[in-house]
Amino acid sequence: MNQLTKQSSDSEIKAYFNAVLKLTKSSEQFPVNLEEVWPLVYSEKGKAVRSLQDNFIENEDYKVFAQNGKNSNGGRPINEYRLSVSCLEYFIVRKVRPVFEVYRKVFHKTTSFQLNPTDPSIVKAKIMVAKFAMNTLNMNDSSKLLLVKSIGDPLGLPLPNYTESVDQLLSPTELLSRMGNPISTREFNQKMIAAGLLEVKERPSSSGKTKTFKSLTKEGMKYGENQVNPSNPKETQPLYYVGMFEKLFDMVTMNRQIV
């Protein structure tokens, strides 16, 4: 099959996924050649291989086939990496929104083939993504629970429906409004960043660009929690404990020592 790139059209991507679907129906466990899909996300094949090896399990999510003979570019023979469908989805497809939309139309809406949410390889991939999100986004317990339930509910695992919080959580905009808006939310965020309590994180957008969002640091989480943004689960939004906000406000606006 032809190699896909960021310049590939929707029809080319759809044709490729349909070919993969046919191989899957014939019980092919690793129907995807990494060589054909890595340019959709990565700038170099080496980066794709390292990410694959670091985040997925060989012989379960992907398989390496040693190629005999010489490399056409000289040097040692190049290994061939074959991916499972679930690995393709979480390793490549979900990182590029337009590609995922095409993938979803081929796989998720095909009545004769549906990914089983209880399949061990899919569960492992979801757990890996969940761990990455929890560690990277500094989620609060409620957001972590929602993520865990999305994995555990299809498996019938008993999980609680809520978590306890230290105090009521509200946005800085609402809390500043209750104080009479002494400064804007933007100014407050800048002071929080300067104090090392808030940081700016990045995520790729569906258009291939980079978007930023704010997240409380470990020190900042003494005064609030990072909740998954309802508008975008790839982001968190900082919420603050009502009972501690005025104290926090005084500290960051008067440059007092953070305690």
Image: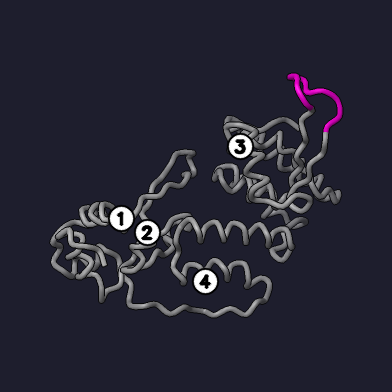
When the figure is inspected, residue 208 is found, relative to residue 179, above or below; the finding is above
Residue density around tag 4, few if under 14, some if 14–19, many if 20 or more, within 10 Å: some
Quarter of the image containing the C terminus? Answer: bottom left
Q: Which residue is mark 4?
A: 145
Label 2 secondary element: loop
Q: Nearer the viewer, mark 4 or mark 3?
A: 3
Q: Which residue is mark 3?
A: 47
Which image quadrant is residue 178 in?
bottom left
Q: Which residues are magenta?
A: 67-76
Q: Gap between marks 2 and 4, in whole Å?
A: 20 Å
143 part of magenta stretch: no
Disc 3 or 1, which lies upstream in sequence?
A: 3
Q: Residue 200 location in percent, x, y? A: 36, 50
Amino acid type of the residue tagged 1 in the rendering: Gly
Disc 4 or 3, which lies upstream in sequence?
A: 3
Q: Is residue 179 left or right of residue 91?
A: left
Disc 2 or 4, which lies upstream in sequence?
A: 4
68 part of magenta stretch: yes
Q: Which residue is mark 1?
A: 196
| Residue 89 shows up from this direction | yes
Q: Which residue is mark 2?
A: 217
Amino acid type of the residue tagged 4 in the rendering: Leu
Disc 2 or 1, which lies upstream in sequence?
A: 1
